[in-house]
Image (cartoon, rainbow, N blue to C red):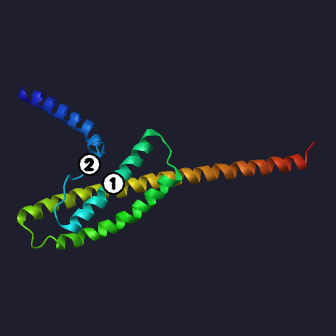
């Protein structure tokens, strides 16, 4: 007799988990920037630059989700951020070498901040690509619509020159 109750509770748990699962994947809260520096210039610079880019991408993503179209300056800023992101991700491996000789506590703090910055960079890369590709597909659709309108106008002009009775 206990198995139907257990099955019902397991089923209820599974349904609740599946309902929340898609929401766990999306980032809705902004990551907090680390408050103070470690004292290692390469780590501090990496974290600062990473979160500067992250803040911009998060802002532009908020605009896109609100339905506010991105201006050309915003798109240029996203493209520049995309370029900077690739360089920062490549430099992340070199930063770990700078941690040699530090105390264990500083190494731990630095590692946590580097990982948090890498998380911000991964979000920035994924979101900026999505925003840029979404904007490019919108531009392509507009260009296709303009071409179709021009073709229709040309067909109308041809029909006016040669009326058929």
Is 98 left, or right, of 119 in this rendering?
left
Question: Looking at the picture, does residue 119 appear above or below residue 28?
Answer: below
Image coordinates for residue 153, horizontal then vertical, percent: 77, 48
Is 45 left, or right, of 58 in this rendering?
left
- Residue holding disc 2: 31
Q: Nearer the viewer, residue 142 or 49?
A: 49
**Looking at the image, which residue is at 44% across and 52% down?**
131
- Residue holding disc 1: 54
Q: Nearer the viewer, residue 15 or 148?
A: 148
Q: Secondary structure at mark 2?
A: loop
**Looking at the image, which residue is at 22% across and 56% down?**
116
Image coordinates for residue 76, horizontal then vertical, percent: 48, 58
Question: Looking at the picture, does residue 142 appear above or below residue 38?
Answer: above
Is 71 left, or right, of 165 in this rendering?
left
Image coordinates for residue 152, horizontal then vertical, percent: 75, 48
On-image quarter of the C terminus: top right
Residues under numbered marks 1 and 2 in contact, where contact means CB atoms less than 8 Å apart: yes
**Which class describes the residues within 10 Å of circle 2: few (<14), some (14-19), or many (20+)?**
some
Q: Going from the N terminus, do you reach mark 1 or mark 2 first? A: 2
On-image quarter of the N terminus: top left
User: Can you tell which quarter of the image residue 128 is in?
Assistant: bottom left
Question: Among all residues in the image, which is located at the extreme right?
Answer: 165
Q: Secondary structure at mark 1?
A: helix
């Amino acid at each position: 007799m206990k198995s139907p109750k257990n099955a019902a509770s397991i089923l209820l748990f599974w349904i609740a988990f599946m309902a929340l699962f898609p929401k766990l994947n999306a980032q809705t809260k902004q990551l907090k920037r680390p408050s103070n520096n470690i004292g290692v210039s390469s780590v501090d610079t990496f974290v600062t630059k990473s979160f500067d880019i992250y803040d911009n991408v998060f802002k532009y993503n908020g605009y896109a989700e609100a339905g506010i179209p991105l201006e050309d300056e915003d798109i240029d800023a996203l493209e520049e951020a995309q370029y900077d992101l690739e360089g920062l991700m490549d430099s992340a491996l070199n930063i770990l070498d700078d941690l040699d000789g530090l105390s264990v506590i500083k190494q731990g703090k630095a590692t946590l901040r580097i990982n948090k910055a890498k998380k911000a960079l991964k979000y920035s890369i994924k979101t900026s690509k999505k925003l840029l590709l979404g904007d490019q597909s919108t531009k392509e659709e507009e260009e296709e619509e303009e071409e179709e309108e021009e073709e229709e106008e040309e067909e109308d002009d041809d029909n006016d020159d040669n009326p058929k009775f």
